[in-house]
Every structure is written in C-alpha cells, then in structure tokens.
Image: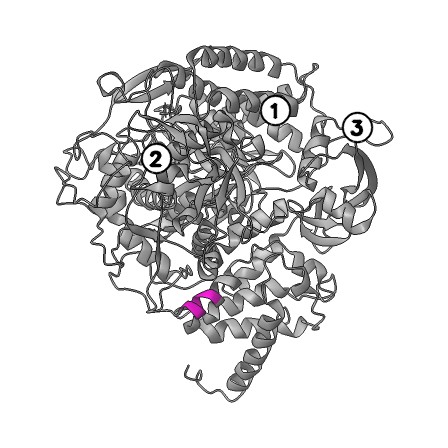
Amino acid sequence: MKKEVIVVGGGLAGLSATMKLAEKGCHVKLISLTKVRRSHSVCAQGGINVAINLKGEEDSPLIHAYDTIKGGDFLGNQPPILEMCMAGPAILRMLDRIGCPFNRTLEGNIDFRRFGGTLYHRTAFCGASTGQQLLYALDEQVRRYEALGQVEKFETHEFLRLILDQEGNARGIVMQDLYNLHLSVLKADAVVIATGGLGVIYKKSTMSTFCTGAANGRLFMQGMKYANGEFIQIHPTAIPGNDKMRLISESSRGEGGRIWVYGDSSKQIAFPDGSMRPCGKTGEPWYFLEEMYPAFGNLVPRDIGSREVLRVCELGLGVEQKMQVYLDVSHLPAEAQHKLEAVLDIYQKFTGDDPRKKPMKIFPAVHYSMGGAWVDWPAADDPDRWTRYRHMTNLKGCFNVGESDYQYHGANRLGANSLLSCIFGGLVTGVEAPRYIASLSKHHGDVSEHIFTDALRQEEHHQKELMNRSGPENIHLLHDELSDWMVQYVSVKRDNPDLQKTIEKLKELRERYRHITLDDKGHTLNQTYVFANQFGPMLELALVIAKGALLRDEFRGAHFKPEFTERDDEHWLKTTIATYNPKEPDISYEPIDMRHLDPIKRDYTHAKKVKPTLKNVPTNIQLPL
Amino acid sequence: MSKSFVLKIFRGTPGKQYWEEFELAIYPGINVISALMDIQKHPVNKSGQKTTPVAWEQGCLEEVCGSCSMLVNGKPRQSCTALVERLIEETGSSTITLAPFTKFPLVRDLVVDRTKMFESLKKVRAWVSVDGTWDSKEKGPKVSPEVQEALYVLSTCMTCGCCSESCPQVNEKSPFMGPAAMSQLRLFNSNPAGALEKSERLRAALGEEGIAGCGNAQNCVKVCPKNIPLTESLALIGREASKQALRDFFSLPDAPR
C-alpha cells in the first residue's frame, strides 16, 4: 500500500518535501492557500548560498557552516547547520538539472555573488528573482508528479486542525475550502507543515499577505512546542509602503551598492570599539557601515545593518530628516545593474524614481522569523539516530519545515541561507516521513472514525461561533493595532517596560477579538471570515514573541535590548521553548547542541579568511539526495 | 475629507454582477491594493450604505507572484503596481474602475479561477523530466550568459493571465491554451535537457488547443507585466510545430538537434 502524506504549504520547503516524497513512492496531498506557484518563496531575490568553490577562493561547506553558526550568534543547533551546508553543492546540482536558470560566467559555469556575513562569493542567483526561479523549478517537478497521479493538490484550501489518534499520532487534518468555507477531513499517516513565516503579525513587513503564521499558531494551541520565537529578522533595506514594505535585496549591496547619509561632523556616534567619533564630514556622503565595519562594510549581517541604520536616523541624520537612508547603486556599471534588474524595477514601479540614476531611499523592515516550530534532529553519529526523526515536532507524525521551523539560523539568519534551509529541510523531511510511516504498526484506516468526525465537529462549531460573534470591533482595525504595537515595541530595539505593556495590550486585543462583528456573513469567498479565523492564532504567536523577548535579558543577534548590551552566554546561551497556556505562553529553555564549534565573539569589524576547525564532524553523514 | 477619489468596482457572483462605488482618501503612494484594504476597515459605499468588503486575490504585492490580476480601468494588469495618483494623472479622471477578468470562471467580486492555465502547463509538459533528484555528482552542461538570459526571461512568467485576458482568440468558443503556455513550451524546448522531449511538446502545440489558435493579434505582448517576448515565442513555436508535423507525416525519426 502507498504511504500517504499530507503536505501543508507549497513554497520551497513544501514543494521540495512533496517532490522527494513522490520520488520515494508516497502519495502526497498538497494543501495550499493559493496556487503553490504563487507562494511567498517567489519574493526571495538575492540567491542561494552554496559553498561549491567555483571562484578560486578555497571556500568549503565547513567554512559555510562556520559563517552560519557565527552569523546566528551561536543560538543555532550545530549538527543540522553542518549537514545543510554539506548538502549545498548537491542541492545546487539538482536545481541546475531541473532547469533553474542560474546566472552564468563567460565560461558557462554558474556564477556566484557576495552576500552578507561572509567574505566568500558563495551565492548562486537567477538575476534578482532567485526565489521565484527556484520555486518554479520545484513547482514544475511537482506538477510532473501530479500528472502521474502521485500528487493531489488542494489549492485555495486552508489547514485548520491537526488530527491526532488516541496514541497521539498525527492521522490527518481538518481543512477549509476558501471558496465556500466548506470543512472537510483529509487522512494520512504523516503531516508535513511548511507554512512559512508570520510577517503579517507585523503587517508592515516584507512578507506576502499569506504569511500570517496562523497554521503554526493553531498547532501551538494544539500542543506543539515553539522555539526561539523572539528572534525576528529585520532586513535593513526595504521601501516603506502602506500595504507592505517592499524588499530591496541584499544582492544590491553584494553587487557593490553602498549605504549612506549626508554626514554631520558636529554629531558623534559610538563606533563598535566603543570610541565616540564624528558622523562623517558635514555635507558629504557618509558611508557609515564602511567606516564602522571596514572588513565587511555594507555586507555586515542584517541585524547589525538594521541597528546601525536606525541609530543613524535617530541622530537626525536620516535623508530629508525622515527615517530613511540612501542605498546607492547608481555608480555601478550597467552590467551589475542589469543583474539587479528585477529589484530595481520594483523600486521604480512603486516610487517613480529610477535607482540607476538616483540613490534609493530605504528603511529596515520585518523580514523573517528565525524562530518557529521546535523540531527534532538526531545527528548522524548519535546512537539513537534511527529511532528518532529529523524535522518531527513534539506531535508524533507531524513534521515542520522551512521558515515555519526553528532550525539552522539561530539568532540571525544570513542572507541567501533561507532558500538553502527550505530546500534542504524539505528534502530531509521527504526522506524521514516515509521512514516514520514504515515504523507504524497501524494505518490511518485502522483509526476509529469518531476521531475524525470529532475533529470536524469542533471546527464546525468554531465556524458557527466566530461567524455569529457580535460587538463593536472590526477585525482589520484590530490587526492595525496589533501590528502597530509589534512594529514599535517588538522589532529592532526592545525595552522591558515596553514589552510588558505590549503583553498586556495583546491580552486586551484577545479580549476585544471576542467582540468582533464580521462585515460579511456569507460563505462564498468570505475573506473577512478567513482572516478573522487566522487572527486568534496570530495573537498567540505574538504573545510568544513578546514574552520570549521580555524574558531574554541580553543582546544576541536580532534580539537587542539597549539595557543589556552584551551577549550573555553564561545565562542565555539556550533555546527558548514556548508551550501553550490559555493565559499566556509558558516559557522554558533547553541546551543548544554545540558539538562542532565553541562560541567566539561575533566580530565583523575586522576579519580575514580563516580556515575554521570544526570539531567532531561525523564521518557517516548521509545527504538527503 | 482631504483629496479623494472614487473606486468603481464591478462585483458580485456569477450571474449577479453589479457596479459599486467607494469614495476613498488619497495619500502618498496609495495603490489599488491599499485602497481595497481601506474598504475592509470601513465597508461603506459612496451612497453611505454599509456593504461587504470587496474580495480580491493578492500575495506578494511586488509583482512577482501573479495573484492580483484584474482589469484596472479596463486594462489587464497587476493591481499592486497600480498607483492611484498615477492612474488619475493618466486618465484625468478621479474615478478608477476595477473589474474581474472575463476569460476565466468568476468566483466572486474581483476573483476568478485561473486553474485552466495551470492545467495547460501539464499539457505542454512544462518541466524537465529528470531521472530523480539524487546527486549524480556531475556538473550540468555549460550555458552561455546569453542563453541563460533568454531562458530567464521566459521563466519569469508568473501565470497571471494578463495575456489570455487580452487575447481575442481565448474565448468560450476556442480551446486555445493561450500565449503563456506556448511560451513555457518554448522555455522547456530551449533547455538543454528539456529539449530531449521537444517533439512531444510540439505535438501538444499541434493539437486543437495549440498554436493554431493564435490569431497574431499581438495584444499579449503589450500587456505582459514581465515583458516576455510572447509573440516571438508564438511565431517560433508555430514554425517548429509545422516542421514537427512534416516529420510526423513522413514518419521520420526526430531530426537531430
């Protein structure tokens, strides 16, 4: 009998899992809010990091792992990072084979650009819409399996609930048809969640409007552990907008773009070494990142870039006295500008200004969630490697992968590592899920039918209750309040009194959410209902983020508190674990697996290419492809 | 109210469509999507009547996902890049009309079901048939930057449907798959590995849903938000398909490439 797996989400992670599962002979039911080809992965612009060493720099997967561990400020578990980096070259070869049109050198080889947090040319790219191209290549492979009958798609459907049998094994889901709100049950013996990030909690983020985090929020409320929620990446360079913040890729700096403001020598700013120095020369461009971080310059990791942009603006040096700085690619040769065409076009379309001639005006924006579902990772040489399952959550048979999990990026993600982690995690899950199903003694057909009908009843009951709520509140106005608070108090800079106030505010919103009236009570494509239904679980994750941030009294990666200016390894070198409690999340901690590299200072002011030594590298690593 | 404009929307469900107007505030940078979001927060029409929020499809809001296609002032396009002030400047009118596409089944308001575009991708075998995803350890074929560039441009198609909407040959009476599918066919026939299935794809183009449907109206290329050379693709596939028909007629094996 065919192994049956449900995959929720059709971005890079969900599609690579689906492709691998189908290749392994499974029958996959693929659920997505939209046509999978429209998933948020299309927004990834800059590229995918792979240490394949085609630039004569003696790059290697071990150096890539070192950069990633250090870039994540040592919060990431090291074995999965190591294996991800080691799988990079094979993943690139696979993407090349399935038709992804990577940019080429004149010799016809795949070309690489530089990205933040590394000194190597390690980022393969397709113009400046790499995510779109990778997603399409995977979408095409999945369509091939669909034509063969191995993949069944349920697009414009939403995951609502995981169904667990009496032993606590995942046996299916309840889903909702977005066209008519019809609720139904899908059965399987493993469920893979690949639902991406949660930027819509902040509304003004670089994320697509699908990225509410509701699926993870629902699973969290069903008992799934959520890890490192407080680590939210703020990207230094986005175009401010009312409906969203539009990303200007880090590749614009990888190709030579520079960040600057007009200097003002009468003002002083603290440099990374602690010295106070003047803010450039009055009236002349001040390339502050290049001055502060001579080794990495404009390519410092994102958390650092965002904080420095904010600091400079807070000193009143923002362009036109506003919270914005210049990102300048106007000096670049036409060839380099051409490689950035996709992003430069976005800027021009939305602002009317041509960035080839005038510097762009940009500001940091919420971009990525390093935290996510807690998932297991037995390392290659762990004695229990084959009795545990990689990427499985604490809910048995429920896997989680991609931006929606917490692996790989620690306290800060390096640019162009997310495409790699999504695809790698997807492939790993594609191998692990069938192995898990093979270990089961029962099949979902053996599970008592009332388990499924009970789950369906609960969702039917909830649908009626939500539809009939009445009170003075409008769900979209509540969303604005939520996002205003989250952007102001739980993003680049965090203070404990503000965080405490935010938690109280979130609880107030939770109460007011009970008193909404939906402006649409119909069943045909009722987007008001669908969003209102997502809002509850979004609030729970907002609480996870805010409470995790409140408790963590240190400065690590993307988590910055002016009151605590140092990384505090003695007290805080540990993973945050949130579990659901109807009042507010319970927070506990677990140790980080640091078997390959001892923590060092994360310094980007000066650096040279060093060959790092990683300890205890297993000799029996099996790549998932 | 400060400066305002009117959004006139053709909305409703199949068989029950009607126009409804909304008066909304203009602010710097406002696009059609922001305006629709403003309606959600205060769903009251121009006559002051409470109404339901308008349904529309959206995703990335930066013109790479293809979700938010609709007719803006009668033209098929992505609504995220439709800036209100620019539209008013272009037309000299402070009313902007929004309507759903007409060549696809209507779901509600501005949302249509574009599933058939994705089904067409199956018919033209828009993929590379790899043996599997395992690592062959071999480097792929070398590709010149020029070829990469050409493939990349074709590969930026986001299945938004603007080309089909603008095409007079895509209609209820014609089975024509539309320009996007033909262009994807060209993409995979140009890929070094994909070319091995060239003949099979061309046979799909020879079918009744294929290239014969193109009437060379050239509307598609004008509305494509990604500037994909669609008419060039259509002409090329037309020529290649004819050659394939001849080869098939004389039962010759596929010509060497």
The segment highlighted magenta reads: B145-149
* Residue located beneath label 2 in the image: A292
In reply to whether residue A365 is colored magenta, the answer given is no
* Residue located beneath label 3 in the image: B44
Same chain letter for marks 3 and 2:
no
**Kind of residue at badge 2:** Met
**Kind of residue at badge 1:** Asp
- Which quadrant of the figure has residue A472? top right
Identify which residue is drawn at 58% across, 80% down. Answer: B239
Q: Between disc 2 and disc 1, whose residue precedes? A: 2
Horizontal placement of A530 versus A427: left or right?
right
**Kind of residue at badge 3:** Val
Nearest to the observer: residue A126 or residue B202: A126
Q: Residue furthest bottom?
A: B250
Dot 3 falls on which chain? B
Horizontal placement of A403 versus A433: left or right?
right
Bin the neighbour count of mark 2 within 10 Å (Cα to Cα): few under 14, some 14-19, many 20 and up. many
* Residue located beneath label 1 in the image: A480
Q: Is mark 1 on a helix, strand or loop?
A: helix
Q: Residue A155 carries which label?
A: none
Is residue A321 in view? yes
Question: Gap between marks 3 and 2, in whole Å?
Answer: 52 Å
Horizontal placement of B170 versus A394: left or right?
right
